[in-house]
Amino acid sequence: MEIIKKPVGGNIDAMAEKVFMESIKMLGGLKKLVEYRNLTWLPSLAEAAYVVVLKNEAMKTYGEIASILGITEQTAKNIASADEEKVKEYVMGGEERPKEHIAGGLAKLAYRKLKEEKAFESVEISMNEAEALDIAWAVHVLSKIKGMDFPVEKGQLAERLQGIKIKGKDIEEILNKIEYPVKSPAELLHKIKENL
């Protein structure tokens, strides 16, 4: 008899987004990441959020997770096995960077907190919550540019991000103010934030 593995809490994308947003909140918010030039953490946090949710909610194996996300099996394992307490100590001002996968540890901390709060019982994130955290647009942009090769020019970004509005502004208006080429996803988010 085949056992069908089904997400315990519901929509995997919504759950991973919630873990991602909680991870950023735990770091002090997107503004804090911009201030400390740690926007390079965002793609890793997004990836780690998916790994943690796929492992714990959808009961996927490391091989399945690697296949779904386009990462190596070892990366999936490193994320899922990160010691969240060591990562927490490091993020809270610890001197020495642990050998743990930092984004993995943060995602696991966020996941655990959300599970304790029973936050996955309703995985739909309200617009008020997203706006209060000021990161919904960043998550949306990152999801649209996933898999893009950087550096990129305006035309490539305009095609991928077409139709997005950020804080009432059309993305095209924002892209017109940005200097090109854009070298990385982190740089793109930083430039968008500067032009809001």
Image (cartoon, rainbow, N blue to C red):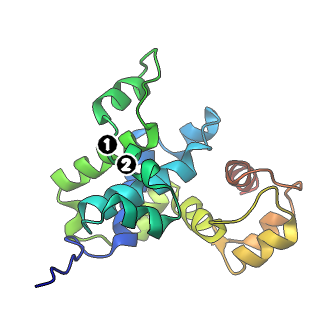
Q: Callout 1 environment at 10 Å: few (<14), some (14 to 19), or many (20+)?
A: some
Mark 1 is on which residue type? Ser
Disc count in the image? 2
Position of the C terminus, as image quadrant, is bottom right
Look at 41% across and 52% down and name the residue there.
76
Whole-angstrom CA distance, mark 2 to mark 1, is 6 Å
Residue at 66%, 75% in the rendered image: 164
**Residues marked 2 and 1 touching at CB (< 8 Å):** yes
Of 51 and 189, nearer the camera is: 51
Can residue 125 be seen in this snapshot?
Answer: no
Under mark 2, the amino acid is: Lys
Image height of 157 relative to 23, above or below: below
Which residue in the protein does label 1 denote?
81
Q: Quadrant of the N terminus?
A: bottom left
For the residue labelled by badge 2, is the local secondary structure a helix, a strand or a loop?
A: helix
Establish if 114 lies above or below 126: above
Residue placed under numbered mark 2 in the picture: 77
Residue 37 visible in the snapshot: yes
Mark 2 Cα-neighbour bin, 10 Å: few <14, some 14–19, many ≥20: many
Q: Residue furthest front?
A: 1
Q: Residue at x 82, y 61 (%)?
A: 152
Percent of width and height locating residue 92: 39, 25
Nearer to us in this view, 187 or 127: 187
**Residue occupying the point 77% across, 57% down:** 150
Residue 175 quadrant: bottom right
Q: Is residue 37 left or right of residue 118?
A: right
Quadrant of res 182: bottom right
Instruction: Find residue 88 and report its image quarter.
Output: top left
Which residue appears farthest toward the bottom when viewing the image? 1
Check disc 1 and report its element: helix, strand or loop: loop
Farthest-out residue, top: 95
